[in-house]
Each structure stands twice: as C-alpha cells, then as structure tokens.
Image: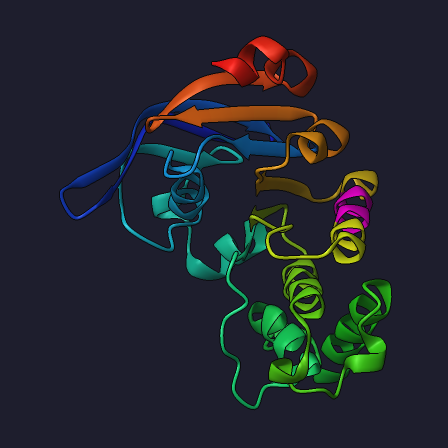
Amino acid sequence: MEEILLEKFGFYYGKNEILKDITLNMKHGEVCAILGPNGAGKSSLIKGIAGIAGEVSGKVTINGMERAEIKREELASLLAYVPQENGYFGEFTVFDTVMDGRYRELKKISRIENIQKVEAVLEEFDCIKIRDKKMEELSGGEKRRVLIARAAVQESRYILMDEPFSNLDIKHQAEVADIIRKFKKSGKTTVIMVIHDINCALSLSDYSVIIKDGEVFRSGITEEVITSETIKS
C-alpha cells in the first residue's frame, strides 16, 4: 500500500510540544490539504513527516517502511520538500538549483542523462528561459516555481509543500495551482500541502486535514471536511 501513515505522532521543539497524538492516513494519488489557524502546527506536521526539524514521537510509516529506518538516498526517492521561505541561494543559478534535486542520481546515471532530466523539468515548469539567471535575481513567484521544479526533478512519490501560495500575486498563484494539477493528473506524485486559502483547498485537494491546537480537528474528503459549520468552529 502506498501511503503515509502517522500513528500517535507528536512533534516537539525542545520541551515545547507542538503536535500531539496525531493519527492520519494519507494515500498516494491524492492531493492533501493541511489547514488550520496560525500557530496550530500545520508546518510542523509536514516538517515532522520529512524529518527536517524538531523532534518527533510515535510512528511515521511511508509505503510500509518506518521513516527512521529509511536510508537518506531512499528517502529522497519517497519525499521531496518545498519550503515556505524562498531562502538565500548566493551565486546559484536556476539550473544549479534544480540540478541539486538530482543529487541521489548523480552516481547512478550519466551527467548527460541528469542534465536532460533537469532541462525537461525546466521546460515543463516554464523555467527554461531563466535557467542561467541567479536565484537572487528572480521574483518571489519565479523562485517558488524553481523550488517546485527542484522537488519535481527528484521524481519522489510525495511532495510536501509549505504554503506554496504565500506572498504570491494572483498570476503566480494560478501558475502554482496549475503545477499542482499537473502532479495530480500524472498519478505519479502525491502533493501534501499546508494552505490557508479554503477556496484553493476545495478546488485542488481530494483530502483535507484541519489542525487545531496541535491536534487533528477534522480529516477526510475535502468537501465533507470544509463546511460552513467547520469554518465557524
């Protein structure tokens, strides 16, 4: 079974408990939206799944394997992470940044094949014209698109996105939404995204999880989870 399963999952920064007793089943092939008020622990949830911050308790199982036992290179084939912050990239170009997503394949296939993979993704995500630009020269929307392209070129089964629409104008929000629809249509990559916009969640996601006070408030089919009653709660 291809799924991410959380059992009695907790997330901590030091002694500060952010999430507690989370049990979720996120199946491959679905777009999953993580919603909730500010400070509820939404970003902590996907960081905990990815194992990139804080400390966790309970169990995280990815496609039947406990995450703690998965080797780093194999984990990269399962999970890719797109941060909310665009970050600082120094002298890195768009091409360099997306090529970074191929690190686990550099010793397995030729450099030429890896370059071809990167160029194909740059073309698909409309980044080919900016391939030689430095990341620090890009707009916020362009950076976000490049970071999603970097995640896509990993060819991972799951992409975890932290607020993919934050600080973007309507044009760039629409571009990111189209990218998420492409992932969904391909059937190869599942998107799990932290999101604030209820309308985006309704239009893009199959499954939604509402986090409140560090716990799962509601989860299930998006149309059944995001209701007027839930919004008022």
Q: Nearer the viewer, residue 198 or 50?
A: 198
Number of numbered discs on residues: 0
Q: Quadrant of the N terminus?
A: top right
Residue found at x 38% / y 37%: 41
Q: Position of residue 131 (x, y in %)?
A: 76, 82
Residue found at x 80% / y 72%: 127
**Based on the displayed image, in which of its 4 quarters is residue 140 positioned?**
bottom right
**Based on the displayed image, in which of its 4 quarters is residue 191 positioned?**
top right
21 lies left or right of 29 = left
**Residue 3 in sight in this render:** no
Residue found at x 33% / y 54%: 53
Q: Position of residue 226 (x, y in %)?
A: 62, 18
**Residue 97 in sight in this render:** yes
Q: Nearer the viewer, residue 114 or 133?
A: 133
Q: Position of residue 12 (x, y in %)?
A: 24, 42
Give the extent of the magenta segment.
177-183
**Based on the displayed image, in which of its 4 quarters is residue 56 positioned?**
top left
State whether residue 104 is above or below residue 196: below
Q: Position of residue 26 (x, y in %)?
A: 56, 28
State whether residue 214 is above or below residue 115: above
1 lies left or right of 18 = right
Determine the residue located farthest toward the top in the rendered image.
229
Q: Nearer the viewer, residue 73 or 211?
A: 211
Q: Nearer the viewer, residue 156 or 45?
A: 45
149 lies left or right of 72 = right
Residue 221 on the magenta span: no
Determine the residue located farthest toward the left in the rendered image.
15
Residue found at x 82% / y 48%: 178
Residue 179 on the magenta span: yes
